[in-house]
Structure formats: structure tokens, C-alpha cells
Amino acid sequence: MIVQKYKEMLDAKSVIRTLAETAAVRAKEIGSRNVFDYSLGNPSVPAPACFQEALLSLVKNEDPVSLHGYSPTLGIPSVKKAIADSLNRRFDMNYEPEHIFPVSAAAAAIAHALRAVTKEGDEVLTFAPFFPEYHPYVDLTGAVLKVVPPDTEKFQIRFDAFEEMLHEKTAAVLINTPNNPSGAVYSEETLQRLAEILNRKQKEYGHDIFLISDEPYREIVFDGKTQPYVSRFYVNTISCYSFSKALSLPGERIGYLAVNPACPDAALIVNMCGQISRGIGHNCPTSLMQLAVARVLDQTADFSIYEKNRDLLYQCLTDIGFEVKKPAGTFYIFPKALEEDAVAFCQKALAYDLVLVPADTFGCPGYFRMAYCMDTEKVERSLPVLRRFAREVYGK
Amino acid sequence: MIVQKYKEMLDAKSVIRTLAETAAVRAKEIGSRNVFDYSLGNPSVPAPACFQEALLSLVKNEDPVSLHGYSPTLGIPSVKKAIADSLNRRFDMNYEPEHIFPVSAAAAAIAHALRAVTKEGDEVLTFAPFFPEYHPYVDLTGAVLKVVPPDTEKFQIRFDAFEEMLHEKTAAVLINTPNNPSGAVYSEETLQRLAEILNRKQKEYGHDIFLISDEPYREIVFDGKTQPYVSRFYVNTISCYSFSKALSLPGERIGYLAVNPACPDAALIVNMCGQISRGIGHNCPTSLMQLAVARVLDQTADFSIYEKNRDLLYQCLTDIGFEVKKPAGTFYIFPKALEEDAVAFCQKALAYDLVLVPADTFGCPGYFRMAYCMDTEKVERSLPVLRRFAREVYGK
């Protein structure tokens, strides 16, 4: 008795993954050097040396029985404490270990948070442009994802549209800043206004509205700026963090969920996550990765390459005449396509071995995403190709 | 809006974990040396040296960007191939990589398998005594777990009771051999008869009944014997494997799900698992662990200590007069308590610093489990204590 729901999901595979597969096939034909694959958000800079050293030291020096032993359901206590301490130091919070749930990266953090605070039929609001994987995360809980249309001017929040879409059934709001795919960083003003509205609506509806904050790019902000810490603005915040981008470890599935200590249900939510974990067979991230990241919490990979790449692409795209906002963080840039149909635009780009992702599934038709986590040398070689494509196909 | 279902689960915490916590508290008072903690099934022998070497070699020699990079949704192809090859070699099967889904240990394998083949309201049958975590695995899919009463004579299957409980709504049967908690190994005869019944019932009902085979102890069989490979007996078998016990890596959350290649939906089920994974935020086990276990697939930790411990305990328990079957595998022994109420029995044992687990939640009231994954020296020291307890409390 094959379950139809999952079978049907197979027909709705990720556009990004499909494009990445196309790029891989093409790379076999002409060499990967010659395919300008801007599809996948896979970090291109190595994990910092301190992380590799932490791994080696743990494997060499720790007793293997305890090193590879079961993590408690709620995470390794010393790791939870180290994470709480680091967040408190950096963001002037007052987390205790009981507010921290180590988890298999942001995907699992969001999936756990959604299960803890939404039930069948509830609504979850998010803001376009948004990461398309939010759909499976929300859909499989039985809740419904509703997408607030984009602010294409600044890629902050269209509060008018947001207020219209909020209602009694809204159980959670899911945000992502720095944003994939726009590269925008939500400002203090944006976060303050968001919190004001949510506080007002909580009172009006007489129930909690949780803010689920997806923060894998929190550390990747350019021009010496930083991302204002979301949880400081709103009490009912569940921060979903991943080390995938910060430490360049996307395959190692390690992150955490942190519930604002002022939230009356903070410790309860973490405890519930332990129960959710039992049921979905998640059972903690690996002990080795928990212990290793705990040793390098305040470190990151070297993001200067991403900033360099952003500068090169932004300059080139504006020179060509693209409508594009300069990304404040992440490793994405999000220009408007040169024709209304971004799918057709990206299809035409493929003929130039430029792999670009149309943003229809990101809730922002007419735009496309470029993930510039690649060697600068390759970005440089792609620029004349981008120029030629725009000139030959669109007369730019 | 805290979800009530998970909140309620908090009140039904694992008996095993609760006892382990009691033991930990007592250990702080009198020293862990003096607490005979038979509660947790946490491997006590180290991972084999070849595994540690594989880890170190990967971290030292591989490019960190690719080593720690994203695993494809369906697992790393070279790892899937290595697993298929190893299974084919050892069990005379003909798996292809497309039938293998690397997964975060057996818990995740079972959770994925259940989601793929059962829907709301379906029934899943299992056999007492059974691992109590099957409840959250099944409950959170919306299906219903039904427990076939135990065969307390041989700890095989009570086929009369099983046949009575099978009906139209049975979507899957969940078995565990070598068995936690009984230590029994299902014989070829048991597996053949199980397959015959399932094949007959599939025809009668006109739909598939999947056999979900939970196999974390597959490699831990004593007296030079082996576990007959379950999937060889029945086509619609989903094997759920974990390296937790075989390689002593319970904290590293690594295993796989393998669908019998003769099952018409084998590759489809693996593909569906990829989709399920997206929704629950599982997204593959860590790249590092996938790559490391692939290098040592046919190796295991040294299980001779478990066999030695089994012999000591079995001898002592039968000497005392316990009714107990000699375990053929695992690191559990499963005697009948010396009074009808095993909960009361285990409570009294605590006064002797003997931490035993009553089997009521395993579906086998009146029995208790001892997990003898500990140093033999400690098992030896516990024997006179066991004798004293039986003598002083029960006059044995």
C-alpha cells in the first residue's frame, strides 16, 4: 500500500536540483570548467582549519565508546551550554541550555518547530521570495503555507499585504534573513514592525503566533555589517540555525533550534522537540558533529570570496542593464529577468552554459537566482558569457 | 498554539530512559562503579580501529569542500553501491544502488518505511516482546500499532494469534530479529512460515503487506551462528539497518534502508523516502559518516565480551532459579521476574543498586530486561548482588 501523497511529491521535484542535474550532465560533455553552474547553494569555501582540527582531536583523543555513544534525546548538555553561552555573548540574550535543541541543520529545526506549534489546518505565513523547501516542511505537518507577495523594491516585507493575510488560523510566521534567494537582510525597522503587528494580533486572536526564524545565513553579511538578531525583537521566536553555511558543512547536518527564554513555553517546546524527534526517527544530530561545532562556535569559514563574487556580479549585471538590488548578505543575487517569463529566460541561458534558476517556485515570477558560491576565477570567466547572452538574445 | 499531542507524549517518557536517569543520580551518590546499570542498550565495546582510521583518513586526506558537502537526497552514490555490493556478497541478494537509502540509523529507517507504506488508520502488527519506541514511530504516522502476544516459550512467533489479528487494514508487519529485548533469533522456519502467511493474506486482501525488518542486531549472534537474512524469505521486505551496534556508533546516527529488489516498487519506495526526508527535515545522514562506514562495511566491533557476559548471566540466573531462555544474540537477556509484578520486582532490585527494566512496556508483563553491554568485570561483581537480592527478597 504505497502512500500516494509521497508518490505525488516525486512529480514535483525541486527545480534547483533538476537544473543542477542538467548542469552535471553538461559538465560531462564539455568539462565542468566550462559550465557556469549558478544553481546550487553549496558552499564553495572550505570549513575553517579550526573545525578540521577539532574533528581530528576528538577522534584521536577521546574514548571512542563515549565519543560515538548516544546523545541524550535533547542533545549533549555541554554542547547545549556552549551554544547558549555563545548566543548570550554575541547577541546579549540569556539562553539556558534548556532552551537549546541541537538538530540536524535548519531543515530539521524548521520541521521540528512547525510540528511543535502548528496542527492540521493551521496556517503558516511566509514572505516571497522564499526558499521552496518550505513547502514540503509545512505540507507534511498538515498545516498550510500561505505566501505574502514580495516587496520587489527593497526585498523587505510588504506589511499591507501581510496584515491582510493574517487571521485567526495563523499559527506561525516563517522568515528567512539574510534571505535566500534575494540576499536582502531584514533591517531593525522591518523586524520591529513585524513584532509590533504580531504582538497586536496575538492579543486580538487570544493565542500565540510563533515566529520561526530560519537563519542559516546569519553570519554571511557583507560590508562589515551584521544581521540584527531576530529573537531580540519578538518573544515567541524560535531561531532555526545551521552550521551548513557558517562553517561550510552542509553535508554534516548540524545546527540547533533556540527558543527565546522569555517565551513562557520555551523549555516545553524544546522538550516537545525531543518527542517529535522520537517519532520521526531524527534522534539528534551525530555526537561527533555536536562536539566538534561546540569547539568552534564563534568561528566561521572565510566569506571574503562570496563578497568579492557579489561585487563582480552586481557590477556586471547593472552594467548590462539588469534590474537588481545589491545583496547585503548570503551568496545569492536576485536580478529581474530580461523577459517576463523567467523560466524561458533561464532556458535560453542554458544554451550559453549559464545555469540560472527561475524564481517562480520562490514566489517571485520574472526573477532569477544566481548562487555565486564558486571560485572567483570562474565568476570572472562567466561575465563575458553573461554579456554575450544578454546582447545576442536581448540586444542589451 | 502548542500542539497537545507532543505535549502529552512528555508524560509517557521512556521507562528505560527514566531508569537510566535514576541510575545516573545514584551513581553520583555512590560512584558509578557501584551501580549495576543494566538499563540502557548502549554498546560498551569500542568502534573497531579500522573505523577510526577511516574517519581520520577522510578528514586528513579529502578536500573539505567535497567531504563536508551536501549528500544527494537519496544518499552518496558510491556509498549506496558499496552497501549493495556488501549485502549481495554476504546474503546472496542482488541489490542495486537504487534499492538502498542511507538513513540516520534504524529509527529513521523505520520511520521512513512506515511513512512510505502506511497511511492514517492503517494497522501495523508487531510481536511482543517489542522495542517500545515502535509506538512513537507508528503513532506519529497516524497508523495504529497492534501487538501480537508473546511466545514466552521460545520467543519466536505465536502464529495462531498473529493470523487472528491480521486483517484488511494490515498494511505492514514490523519484526525485530535478533530481538530486543528477548535476545532470540528468528529461525528459518519462523521466517518461512511468516512469509507463507503474508503471501496468502496479500492475495486474499488484494493489496501489499510490507514486512519492515528492524535489524540493528543482525551481526550480534552468538555460538558461531548467524541470523538468516529476512529479505530472502519475503519479497515485500524493507530491511532497516543501523551501524549503531555493529560498529558501536549509536551516537553517529548512521544506517540504511534496503528494499528487496524483487519488490516491484523497490526503487519507487526509495525515491519516496527521499521525499519523506525532505518533509521531516531528515535530509540524509552526515556525509562523513556515510563515507566512513562505506569503508568498513564487512567489519564489526568485537562482540566476544557480550557473549562472555551472556554466559555469566545466564549461568547465574538459572542457578538462582530464574525462568530464562538463553539469548542467541544481541546484548540482552530476558528472565521472568520472581513475582508476577515485574515493575514491583525491578523497584525492589533498585534497593540493591541493580537497575533492571520491567518488560510491561515491551508487551510482556512479568518479565524484565537486562542490557549486559558493560565490562565483564562489572557483570562478575553484580552476580553475588543478584544472588543476595533473590535470596533476601524472594528466599531463592
Image (tube, coloured by chain):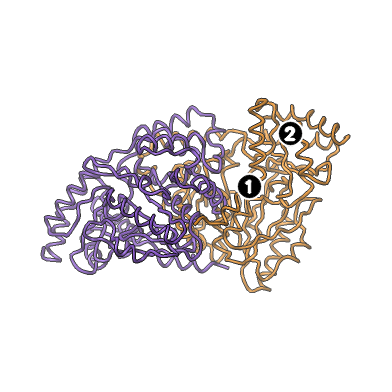
Chain colours: A orange, B purple
**Disc 1 secondary structure class:** loop
Quadrant of the snapshot with the N terminus of chain B: bottom right
Closest to the camera, between mark 1 and mark 2, is 1
Q: Which residue is mark 1?
A: A13
**Disc 2 secondary structure class:** strand
Q: To which chain does the residue with label 2 belong?
A: A
Number of numbered markers? 2
The picture quadrant where one finds residue B220 is: top left
Vertical arrangement, residue A379 with respect to residue B233, above or below: above
Q: To which chain does the residue with label 1 belong?
A: A
Residue A94 shows in the view? no
Could you tell me which residue is drawn at 67 percent across and 45 percent down? Answer: A15
Tag 2: amino acid: Leu
Vertical arrangement, residue A93 with respect to residue B60, above or below: below
Q: Which residue is mark 2?
A: A354
Coordinates of residue A158 in the picture (x, y in percent): 77, 58
